[in-house]
Amino acid sequence: MSQEVGILAPVPSLENIPSQEVPTAGGIGDSSPESHASSQEYSDLAIADVNDYVNVRSTPDTNGEILGKMYDGSVAHILSAVGEGEDTWFQVTSGSVEGYIKAEYFIYGEAAAAVIEDYVTRFAQVEADRLNVRKEADINSSRIGYLDHGEKAKILELGEEWHKVQYADGSEGFVSSQYVTVLEEFNYAKSIEEERAEQEARRKAEAEAAARAAKSEQAAPESTNVTPPSTSYTSNEELRSAIVEYAKQFVGNKYVSGGRSLTSGTDCSGFTCYVFADFGYSISRTPQGQWTSNGRSISVDEIQPGDVVCYSSNGSKCTHVGLYIGDGKIVHAANSRRGVVTDDIYYDDTFLGVKNIID
């Protein structure tokens, strides 16, 4: 409901309120304590203190056209003061909105400088290509959705390894702090046009969040930022370890039959082919070609991380391949339903043999 009144402490003195435009206060986005502590820096700052919102009007009276709204906790810069006593109005600018609001609806002056830290909103901005939002602060927790590169989520609780955030559909979840940048922002007035646009964007975001939540758990890894391989290794063991770590970065990516990209999607033999290609090895693009034409056959007892494990659905011709990563596990582009995953080397009964590509 529209408001012209708010709930406030007594209005501070107007002696320090500027009568003309003053420079915008700096420091927004700077998390250092000094950036929010100076009362002089925020001498022109006003913080809305109302039940819900207060209207920004075109003239200093209640008959003025409504240009926008200032919600509780949003900030404005005071340009001038009009009137006296209880009938004092501030001419303010906030966001894209400039107009008049009664002074009694604000915390301002030294009182505003003393509490400004309480009105900073923090957001987690995603630096990875895609980042899971988890139900709990645990890598093994179920996924409620994901955020793409550059997207932001409001932080509800800051943590060292995980931040609790507000997700688009109104639910709460956790994101890994390793893959986000924390931004600090003030809330500002919203014009009538901005409010309409935000309402439409919110409807779209909620629909998209619902669609994202319906995707499989394997659809989004914690990060798809890829660390490229080095160019030199001191031993085969070091090289094999690098190949394994490189390949594991793509867990969660899509399976695309005939696909040509480790990040955008490929199939089982494409996965092993392109992983080895990034380390300077040229191997066949097909499972059967990797089984018959590349490397040398070895027994399971000789297997090492970085070897290619071959499978056959008919007992002779190789129809599937994966990369051995140690501890009896492989990483492979399994199928269109599961994508790139890790499995036990004997995850089904079609095991055919092992190829040593490296030495």
Image: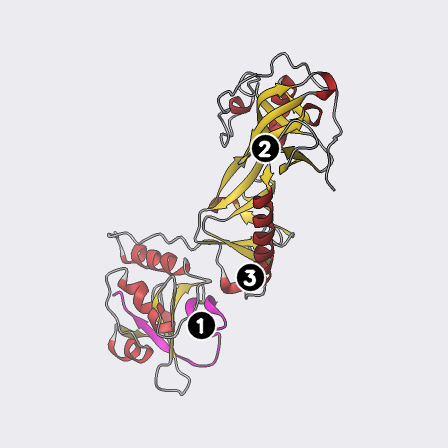
Q: Which residue has dot 1 on it?
A: 334
Image location (x, y in percent) of residue 296 = 26, 74
Above or below for 197 versus 315: above
> Of residues 216 and 114, which is closer to you in this image?
114
Residue 119 visible here = yes
In this rendering, position of residue 236 left or right of residue 169: left
N-term-proximal mark, 1 vs 3 = 3
The 10 Å Cα crowd at callout 2, few under 14, some 14 to 19, many 20 or more, is many
Above or below for 155 versus 324: above
> Of residues 320 and 81, which is closer to you in this image?
81
The tag on residue 212 is 3
For label 1, the SS is: strand
The magenta span reads 330-359
Say which residue appears at 30% left-offset and 69% top-offset: 273
Badge 1 vs badge 2, beta-carbon distance below 8 Å: no
Magenta stretch encompasses residue 281: no
